[in-house]
Amino acid sequence: MDHFAYRGGRLMAEEVALDDIAAAYGTPVYVYSSATMLRHYRVMAEAFADVDAAIYYALKANDNLAVVRTLARAGAGADVVSLGELRKALAARVRPERIVFSGVGKTAAELAAALALGIMQFNVESVQELDSLSAIAAAQGRVAPIALRVNPDVDAKTHAKITTGKKENKFGVPIGEAMALYARAARLPGIQPVAVAVHIGSQLTSLAPYEAAFRKVLALGQALRAAGHDIRRLDLGGGLGIRYRNETPPSPARYAAMVKRVTRGAGFGLMLEPGRMIVGNAGVLLTRVIYTKPGVGQGFAIVDAAMNDLIRPPLYDAFHEVVPVRQRNRAKRQRVEVVGPICESGDVLAHRRMLPPLNPGDLLAIRSAGAYGAVMASSYNARPLVPEVLVDGPRHAAVRPRQSIDALLALDRMPDWLDSRAAE
């Protein structure tokens, strides 16, 4: 469920008309619904309320400070994968002891900064990372609480570019090597193994891969305890899918029931790291039609949003529903390609969609754009980053302003041998 619905023929974000948003902030513009993300967070939290479980929002899905702060106020911690995301979590007032640092390529500087802050847990993904963290912790006179992220070799049955739990993926350590690595970790100075971590992919629509992975992780945790390790928690990652088109992902309640059935009576605390599931359907990308023109088999609607604003369709062949902001139920539908102005044939935001006749100036909403939308944007073709707007009931505010072309130009520096007027 989300809080984007037609009212009086106008598509609304909670109590704010999206055409009013477009008038106030211009297009393209991302619009986020506070009520939607809070509802999704609370549904997940309530599903696990009867067990020892905590939610750490995965900033990689959407790291806007206002989004992170909204969820932190509701009780979420943060799952980060870079020093930048760590700084964002802190800026959104997430306490260090509520932050988990994941990621396959943490640098020594990132490890040192996170350790000095006293974060809750490092999810370590290689022997070399483990040794590096040990050396840094010993030098600081600190102890780093860690989980080893294990790779269970489970196929998540999701897109090849977002599966992370198969043996050929770069993530984690082979689960068969985990016992020896935990023994090594326990001997290292400055290292305290406290958990086992796993994350098998994103946009999962079946519980079966989860259950297969979690049973392996549970067995590992129990074996580690039997070997004398003080393993307190199982970090189960995230990845629960959302509905973009006709998917039927499991509800948080069904997911929680499976997790509790698998882990019941084992005595482990649980850590959950959802991202897309919370914010994916809490956002839309508003765009305006610039031109229309005929094509072979279908027409083209050339809009002011492009692949630099929303890379998911060309990168993953991802489907996002596209709807007119002004409802036109009686209009005869026509097949159209919704494309941007980028000089790439791949700049297609929606392929062969049936939409009412479009004219220059019409507004469209690209739905389910709250996750991996603005956060993956670029300034390709020297297109400034678009604004992000947060709606809360009747209120709305720009939570990231539109980047100006002057600000974009100011990022570059001219070397002195090219900047000298005398050389011309």
Image (tube, grey):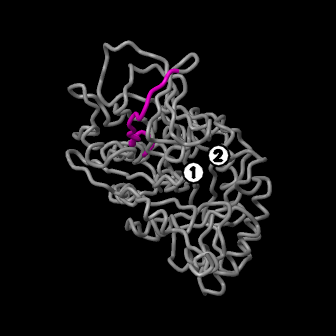
Q: Is residue 270 visible?
A: no
60 versus 21 height, above or below: below
Q: Label 1 neighbourhood size at 10 Å, few (<14), some (14-19), many (20+)?
A: many
Q: Residue 237 carries which label?
A: 1
Location of mark 2 (residue): 200
In the rendered structure, are the residues bearing label 1 and label 2 in contact, judged by CB atoms less than 8 Å apart? yes
Screen quadrant of the C terminus: bottom right
Q: Label 2 neighbourhood size at 10 Å, few (<14), some (14-19), many (20+)?
A: many
Where residue 330 appears, x then y in whole percent?
A: 31, 13
Front one among 173 and 161: 161
Asked if residue 290 lies in the magenta stretch, the reply is: yes
The residue type indicated by label 1 comes to: Gly
First to last magenta residue range: 279-294
Q: What element carries label 1?
A: loop
Asked if residue 25 lies in the magenta stretch, the reply is: no
Which sits earlier in the primary sequence, circle 1 or circle 2?
Answer: 2
Q: In this view, does 193 lie to the left or right of 90?
A: right
Where residue 245 appears, x then y in whole percent?
A: 49, 27
Q: Which mark is residue 210?
A: none
Which residue is rendered at x = 46% and y = 57% of the image?
A: 63
Q: Is mark 2 on a helix, strand or loop?
A: loop
Which residue is rendered at x = 21% and y = 49% of the image?
A: 395
290 versus 101 height, above or below: above
Give how far apart the Cα atoms at labels 1 and 2 are. Answer: 8 Å
Q: Which of the 4 quarters of the picture holds residue 135?
A: bottom right
